Image (tube, helix red, strand yellow):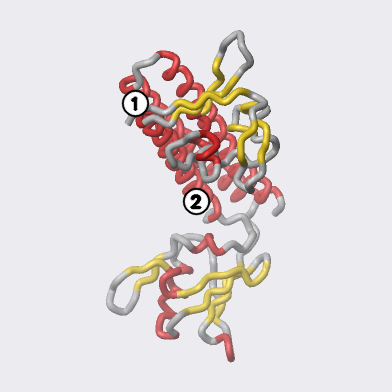
Amino acid sequence: MVPIKVLIRLGSRVRSRDGTWRALHRLRSDGANWAGSSPERLCATPWTSALGCSGQSFTLTQTLFLCRWKKSSAKRAVIVDTGDATTERARWLREAEDQMRLAREALERDLQAMRTGRAHPGLLDAVLVTLSDGSRVPLRKVAHVSQKDARTLQVLIHDTSWLAPCDKAIRDAGLGLNPLRGTGDSDHALYVPVPAPSQEARQHIARLASHRTEETRKTIRLVRRNLLERIKSQVSREDDRFMMKEQVEELVERWIKLVDQVLQAKVRELNQH
Protein backbone atom coordinates (compact mmCIF):
# COMPACT_ATOMS: atom_id res chain seq x y z
CA MET A 1 0.00 0.00 0.00
CA VAL A 2 1.35 3.40 -0.96
CA PRO A 3 1.21 5.83 1.99
CA ILE A 4 -1.60 8.37 1.65
CA LYS A 5 -0.62 11.86 2.75
CA VAL A 6 -3.32 14.49 2.84
CA LEU A 7 -2.32 18.12 3.33
CA ILE A 8 -5.04 20.32 4.84
CA ARG A 9 -4.36 24.02 5.17
CA LEU A 10 -5.48 25.76 8.33
CA GLY A 11 -8.80 27.46 7.78
CA SER A 12 -9.91 24.89 5.21
CA ARG A 13 -13.39 23.45 5.70
CA VAL A 14 -13.93 19.76 6.39
CA ARG A 15 -17.13 17.82 7.03
CA SER A 16 -17.63 16.85 10.68
CA ARG A 17 -19.32 13.73 11.99
CA ASP A 18 -22.68 15.48 12.42
CA GLY A 19 -22.70 16.34 8.72
CA THR A 20 -21.92 20.04 9.10
CA TRP A 21 -18.90 21.79 7.63
CA ARG A 22 -16.31 23.23 10.00
CA ALA A 23 -13.04 25.08 9.63
CA LEU A 24 -9.81 23.55 10.91
CA HIS A 25 -8.30 26.29 13.08
CA ARG A 26 -5.31 24.70 14.77
CA LEU A 27 -3.66 21.48 15.91
CA ARG A 28 -3.28 21.15 19.67
CA SER A 29 -0.76 18.99 21.51
CA ASP A 30 -3.57 16.60 22.49
CA GLY A 31 -4.96 16.10 18.99
CA ALA A 32 -6.73 17.92 16.22
CA ASN A 33 -9.17 20.64 17.18
CA TRP A 34 -12.04 20.81 14.73
CA ALA A 35 -13.50 24.19 15.64
CA GLY A 36 -14.73 22.92 18.98
CA SER A 37 -15.80 19.43 17.96
CA SER A 38 -14.25 16.38 19.63
CA PRO A 39 -10.73 15.41 18.44
CA GLU A 40 -11.23 11.74 19.29
CA ARG A 41 -11.61 10.65 15.69
CA LEU A 42 -9.66 12.12 12.83
CA CYS A 43 -10.38 9.65 10.08
CA ALA A 44 -13.74 8.22 11.08
CA THR A 45 -16.75 8.44 8.79
CA PRO A 46 -17.64 10.99 7.46
CA TRP A 47 -14.18 12.46 7.98
CA THR A 48 -12.86 9.89 5.53
CA SER A 49 -14.45 11.46 2.49
CA ALA A 50 -13.28 14.92 3.50
CA LEU A 51 -9.72 13.93 4.34
CA GLY A 52 -9.18 11.31 1.67
CA CYS A 53 -8.39 8.63 4.25
CA SER A 54 -8.56 4.99 3.30
CA GLY A 55 -11.25 4.05 5.81
CA GLN A 56 -9.19 3.72 9.01
CA SER A 57 -10.59 5.01 12.27
CA PHE A 58 -7.88 6.62 14.41
CA THR A 59 -8.12 7.14 18.16
CA LEU A 60 -6.77 10.16 20.03
CA THR A 61 -3.43 8.47 20.74
CA GLN A 62 -3.01 7.62 17.07
CA THR A 63 -4.01 11.14 16.09
CA LEU A 64 -1.06 12.47 18.11
CA PHE A 65 1.28 10.66 15.75
CA LEU A 66 -0.67 10.95 12.52
CA CYS A 67 -0.97 14.75 12.61
CA ARG A 68 1.99 17.04 12.22
CA TRP A 69 2.68 20.59 11.18
CA LYS A 70 4.05 21.25 7.72
CA LYS A 71 6.76 23.87 8.19
CA SER A 72 7.01 26.22 5.26
CA SER A 73 6.93 29.90 4.46
CA ALA A 74 3.42 29.44 3.12
CA LYS A 75 0.31 29.24 5.25
CA ARG A 76 0.76 26.47 7.83
CA ALA A 77 -1.01 23.19 7.22
CA VAL A 78 -1.52 19.77 8.74
CA ILE A 79 -0.32 16.53 7.16
CA VAL A 80 -2.35 13.38 7.79
CA ASP A 81 -0.37 10.24 6.97
CA THR A 82 -2.33 6.96 6.74
CA GLY A 83 0.41 4.75 5.33
CA ASP A 84 1.14 1.26 6.66
CA ALA A 85 4.29 2.28 8.56
CA THR A 86 2.54 5.23 10.18
CA THR A 87 -0.48 3.26 11.39
CA GLU A 88 1.85 0.53 12.70
CA ARG A 89 3.74 3.09 14.81
CA ALA A 90 0.44 4.52 16.05
CA ARG A 91 -0.40 1.00 17.20
CA TRP A 92 2.83 0.95 19.25
CA LEU A 93 1.65 4.04 21.11
CA ARG A 94 -1.79 2.57 21.68
CA GLU A 95 -0.35 -0.68 23.06
CA ALA A 96 1.99 1.25 25.37
CA GLU A 97 -0.91 3.33 26.67
CA ASP A 98 -2.94 0.17 27.28
CA GLN A 99 -0.10 -1.22 29.42
CA MET A 100 0.06 2.01 31.42
CA ARG A 101 -3.70 1.94 31.93
CA LEU A 102 -3.58 -1.64 33.22
CA ALA A 103 -0.78 -0.72 35.63
CA ARG A 104 -2.86 2.15 37.04
CA GLU A 105 -5.96 -0.05 37.36
CA ALA A 106 -3.93 -2.66 39.27
CA LEU A 107 -2.68 0.07 41.61
CA GLU A 108 -6.24 1.24 42.25
CA ARG A 109 -7.32 -2.30 43.19
CA ASP A 110 -4.36 -2.78 45.51
CA LEU A 111 -4.88 0.53 47.29
CA GLN A 112 -8.61 -0.10 47.67
CA ALA A 113 -7.76 -3.33 49.50
CA MET A 114 -5.79 -1.38 52.12
CA ARG A 115 -8.05 -0.78 55.11
CA THR A 116 -8.61 2.88 55.95
CA GLY A 117 -11.73 2.66 58.11
CA ARG A 118 -14.12 3.17 55.20
CA ALA A 119 -16.08 0.13 54.06
CA HIS A 120 -15.22 -0.72 50.47
CA PRO A 121 -16.09 -4.01 48.71
CA GLY A 122 -12.57 -4.18 47.27
CA LEU A 123 -11.29 -4.70 50.82
CA LEU A 124 -12.27 -8.38 50.57
CA ASP A 125 -11.02 -9.01 47.03
CA ALA A 126 -8.01 -11.02 48.22
CA VAL A 127 -10.00 -13.25 50.63
CA LEU A 128 -9.89 -16.95 49.67
CA VAL A 129 -12.55 -19.38 50.92
CA THR A 130 -11.75 -23.06 51.56
CA LEU A 131 -14.74 -25.20 50.55
CA SER A 132 -15.68 -28.66 51.80
CA ASP A 133 -13.88 -30.38 48.91
CA GLY A 134 -10.62 -28.62 49.84
CA SER A 135 -10.64 -26.18 46.93
CA ARG A 136 -9.88 -22.51 47.57
CA VAL A 137 -11.86 -19.89 45.66
CA PRO A 138 -12.09 -16.10 45.87
CA LEU A 139 -14.85 -14.85 48.16
CA ARG A 140 -16.46 -12.99 45.25
CA LYS A 141 -17.10 -16.37 43.55
CA VAL A 142 -19.33 -17.63 46.36
CA ALA A 143 -20.78 -14.37 47.68
CA HIS A 144 -21.76 -10.85 46.70
CA VAL A 145 -19.94 -8.11 48.65
CA SER A 146 -21.47 -4.65 48.92
CA GLN A 147 -21.30 -1.59 51.16
CA LYS A 148 -24.10 -1.53 53.74
CA ASP A 149 -23.01 1.81 55.19
CA ALA A 150 -19.83 3.86 55.58
CA ARG A 151 -18.38 1.46 58.16
CA THR A 152 -20.00 -1.89 57.30
CA LEU A 153 -19.72 -4.41 54.47
CA GLN A 154 -22.53 -6.81 53.62
CA VAL A 155 -21.60 -10.27 52.33
CA LEU A 156 -24.51 -12.20 50.80
CA ILE A 157 -23.59 -15.89 50.56
CA HIS A 158 -24.91 -17.74 47.50
CA ASP A 159 -25.27 -21.05 49.41
CA THR A 160 -25.88 -21.19 53.18
CA SER A 161 -23.53 -24.20 53.41
CA TRP A 162 -20.71 -21.78 52.57
CA LEU A 163 -21.56 -19.42 55.43
CA ALA A 164 -19.10 -20.86 57.98
CA PRO A 165 -16.18 -21.16 55.49
CA CYS A 166 -16.72 -17.54 54.40
CA ASP A 167 -16.85 -16.34 57.99
CA LYS A 168 -13.58 -18.14 58.78
CA ALA A 169 -11.88 -16.90 55.59
CA ILE A 170 -12.59 -13.27 56.43
CA ARG A 171 -11.42 -13.67 60.04
CA ASP A 172 -8.19 -15.43 58.97
CA ALA A 173 -7.35 -13.03 56.11
CA GLY A 174 -5.12 -10.85 58.27
CA LEU A 175 -7.33 -7.78 57.80
CA GLY A 176 -8.36 -7.45 61.43
CA LEU A 177 -12.04 -7.97 60.53
CA ASN A 178 -14.63 -9.93 62.55
CA PRO A 179 -17.85 -10.73 60.65
CA LEU A 180 -21.26 -10.86 62.36
CA ARG A 181 -23.87 -13.32 61.18
CA GLY A 182 -27.27 -12.07 60.10
CA THR A 183 -30.51 -13.28 61.65
CA GLY A 184 -34.02 -13.90 60.37
CA ASP A 185 -34.36 -13.02 56.69
CA SER A 186 -30.64 -12.20 56.65
CA ASP A 187 -29.42 -15.58 57.92
CA HIS A 188 -27.51 -16.06 54.64
CA ALA A 189 -25.53 -12.84 55.15
CA LEU A 190 -22.43 -11.71 57.00
CA TYR A 191 -22.00 -8.12 58.20
CA VAL A 192 -18.41 -6.97 58.48
CA PRO A 193 -17.73 -3.86 60.61
CA VAL A 194 -14.65 -1.99 59.39
CA PRO A 195 -12.97 -0.30 62.38
CA ALA A 196 -11.04 2.90 61.94
CA PRO A 197 -7.26 2.22 61.94
CA SER A 198 -5.02 3.65 64.64
CA GLN A 199 -2.62 6.50 63.88
CA GLU A 200 0.25 4.03 63.67
CA ALA A 201 -1.74 1.80 61.29
CA ARG A 202 -2.59 4.80 59.07
CA GLN A 203 1.09 5.73 58.82
CA HIS A 204 1.94 2.14 57.90
CA ILE A 205 -0.78 2.07 55.20
CA ALA A 206 0.48 5.37 53.82
CA ARG A 207 4.00 3.93 53.49
CA LEU A 208 2.67 0.80 51.79
CA ALA A 209 0.58 2.89 49.39
CA SER A 210 3.56 5.10 48.53
CA HIS A 211 5.76 2.05 47.89
CA ARG A 212 3.10 0.41 45.71
CA THR A 213 2.68 3.65 43.73
CA GLU A 214 6.42 3.87 43.08
CA GLU A 215 6.30 0.31 41.73
CA THR A 216 3.62 1.43 39.28
CA ARG A 217 5.72 4.42 38.20
CA LYS A 218 8.60 2.03 37.52
CA THR A 219 6.29 -0.16 35.42
CA ILE A 220 5.28 2.83 33.32
CA ARG A 221 8.91 3.87 32.88
CA LEU A 222 9.75 0.33 31.78
CA VAL A 223 7.03 0.56 29.13
CA ARG A 224 8.61 3.82 27.99
CA ARG A 225 12.09 2.29 27.83
CA ASN A 226 10.88 -0.68 25.78
CA LEU A 227 9.00 1.58 23.38
CA LEU A 228 11.95 3.95 22.94
CA GLU A 229 14.19 0.98 22.14
CA ARG A 230 11.68 -0.16 19.55
CA ILE A 231 11.56 3.30 17.99
CA LYS A 232 15.35 3.49 17.92
CA SER A 233 15.71 0.13 16.18
CA GLN A 234 12.75 0.27 13.77
CA VAL A 235 12.22 3.92 12.81
CA SER A 236 14.82 5.09 10.33
CA ARG A 237 13.94 8.73 9.77
CA GLU A 238 15.40 11.04 12.39
CA ASP A 239 12.47 13.49 12.40
CA ASP A 240 10.00 10.61 12.87
CA ARG A 241 12.07 9.28 15.77
CA PHE A 242 12.18 12.70 17.38
CA MET A 243 8.43 13.22 17.00
CA MET A 244 7.59 9.79 18.42
CA LYS A 245 9.94 10.26 21.37
CA GLU A 246 8.19 13.53 22.21
CA GLN A 247 4.82 11.80 22.11
CA VAL A 248 6.08 8.95 24.29
CA GLU A 249 7.28 11.45 26.90
CA GLU A 250 3.90 13.22 26.84
CA LEU A 251 2.16 9.88 27.28
CA VAL A 252 4.36 8.89 30.23
CA GLU A 253 3.97 12.26 31.90
CA ARG A 254 0.18 12.04 31.65
CA TRP A 255 -0.05 8.52 33.10
CA ILE A 256 2.42 9.28 35.90
CA LYS A 257 0.13 12.15 36.90
CA LEU A 258 -2.88 9.83 36.84
CA VAL A 259 -1.00 7.33 39.03
CA ASP A 260 -0.07 10.08 41.48
CA GLN A 261 -3.74 11.06 41.68
CA VAL A 262 -4.59 7.53 42.88
CA LEU A 263 -2.08 7.86 45.73
CA GLN A 264 -3.31 11.35 46.61
CA ALA A 265 -6.89 10.08 46.85
CA LYS A 266 -5.77 7.29 49.20
CA VAL A 267 -3.88 9.72 51.42
CA ARG A 268 -6.95 11.98 51.62
CA GLU A 269 -9.06 8.97 52.57
CA LEU A 270 -6.59 8.06 55.33
CA ASN A 271 -6.59 11.59 56.70
CA GLN A 272 -10.39 11.59 57.00
CA HIS A 273 -10.28 8.88 59.70
In the rendered view, would you say 262 is above or below 169? above
Quadrant of image for the N terminus: top left
Specify the amino acid type for callout 1.
Arg
Residue 77 visible from this viewpoint: yes
> Crowdedness of circle 2 by 10 Å Cα count: few (<14), some, many (20+)?
some
Residue 210 visible from this viewpoint: no
Quadrant of image for the C terminus: bottom right
Q: Residue at x 31, y 79 (%)?
A: 132
In depth, the one of 99 and 130 nearer the eye is 99
**Residue 137: image x %, image y %?**
36, 68
Disc 1 from disc 2: Cα separation? 31 Å
- The residue under label 1 is 230
- The residue under label 2 is 110
> Crowdedness of circle 1 by 10 Å Cα count: few (<14), some, many (20+)?
few
Q: Residue at x 61, y 8 (%)?
A: 73
Q: Is residue 173 left or right of residue 72?
A: left
In the rendered view, would you say 265 is above or below 253? below
Disc number lying in front (1 or 2) = 1
Query: Where on the picture, by quarter, is residue 177?
Result: bottom right
**Residue 60: image x %, image y %?**
53, 38
**Residue 167: image x %, image y %?**
47, 75
- The answer to which of marks 1 and 2 sits earlier in the sequence is 2
